[in-house]
Image: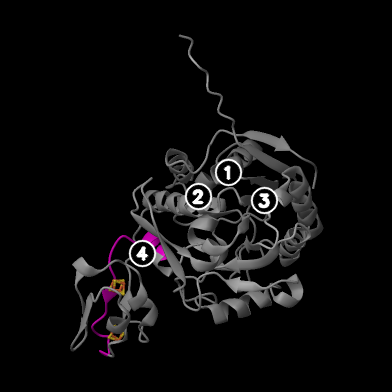
Amino acid sequence: MKKRTVVVERPRVFLVPLPEQADVQGLIGAVEQLWVAMKLKAMIPKGGLVAIKQHFGERGGANVVPAPVTRAVGEQVKAAGGKPFATDSNTLYNGRRANAVDHLEQSREHGFSHETLGFPVIIADGLKGEAQVTIPMKEGNLKHVFLAGAGYMADAVVVLTHVTGHLVACMGASIKNVAMGMAGRAGKLQQHHSAEPIFSKSKCTACGRCARHCPTAAITVEKYATLDVKRCIGCGECYAFCPHGAVSFEWSETSEALQKKMAEYCLAFHREKQGRVVYINFITRITKNCDCLGKEEPALPDLGVVASFDPVAADTAVVDLLTARHGHDVFKEFWPQYDARIQLEHGERIGLGSMQYDLVTVGKG
Ligand code: SF4
Ligand code: SF4
């Protein structure tokens, strides 16, 4: 009997090259070329709620995907019959984006508002990160993940990612943008730490708020709050509700563990969208640190914009193109102790996507 040969089609990654100092018009032009070349109109459901997921920037941060580009994407979504909204989730750390009120104010200061975009900005995980959906998992190490409500419920998603280095993940591209930005508070906690909360006796006033909001009754408050470790599921409610800063976590997650969890979060999100998600990486204004750190000068000249329906392929192309341009792995140069390929290899292993791809150059920016 003849053996059947199964031909597995490799994902395509589309590239629009850009000059070394690309301007906003160049970025808009790149997105418009990608929209046509990838036939993105077809993934927009008529009347569907379409999330444009991106980072709005921490105070002073000028490197994020600019608001006029977001607006241009939204116009394409509208032309295809969808209803766009720009979105990101709140941060765990106490910056300008730790709750929806501050986050919307910060976004507006960077040009992201209904008035400037022509469509709403919605914080994906609610006022304080509580709007999240629990998804069971079996592909990797995590048994369940917590996705931000608005990202989970969106009918289609355009992920706009400003590529950066990262002080733990080594590289932040589409996988990281989705993993953190489309996770609720418990999801970010789960990715960033592997331990239960720590209660400070000296800061605790025994007000009892944490215990009232703990979903598993893991906290007892007498003279101060104490934890029953066996009951704790790491949801972070106590951290969010403590008004006195008495709850903290050990932010000790290793780069390898974090990168693997990121890939698993991205998988949960990607699978949910069933083909209605595209990942667009802007290889522009690349910094050693992520955009959460605010102001930082770019470390590398601009290269271009790549996009794929496969997040592993899209992010692998970023590493490959930068390595080809500079002759070495630039993320390894930023963070010699880490390896950005861990998130890509784990993503491939669990079925998120492929590190093998075909590069299609669609135009010049
Ligand atoms: S992390 Fe969640 S489950 Fe654990 S003590 Fe805090 S509120 Fe309770
Ligand atoms: S909410 Fe904070 S201050 Fe109040 S009991 Fe819990 S840990 Fe102590």
Question: Which amino acid does the dot numbered 2 rest on?
Answer: Arg
Colouring style: one colour
Residue position marked by numbered label 3 in the rendering: 43
User: Marks 1/3: CA distance?
Assistant: 14 Å
Residue position marked by numbered label 2 in the rendering: 271
- The chief SS type of the magenta part is loop
Q: Give the left or right position of residue 311, taking residue 118 as reference.
A: left
The magenta stretch spans which residues?
A: 187-206
Mark 1: which secondary structure? loop
Name the residue at 69% across, 75% down.
Answer: 113
- Considering the image in quadrants, where does the N terminus appear? top left
Q: Position of residue 64 (x, y in %)?
A: 65, 62
User: Marks 2/1: CA distance?
Assistant: 11 Å
Identify the mark at residue 310; answer none if there is no mark.
1
Residue position marked by numbered label 4 in the rendering: 251
Relative to 259, say whether 320 is above or below: above
Name the residue at 60% across, 53% down.
Answer: 163
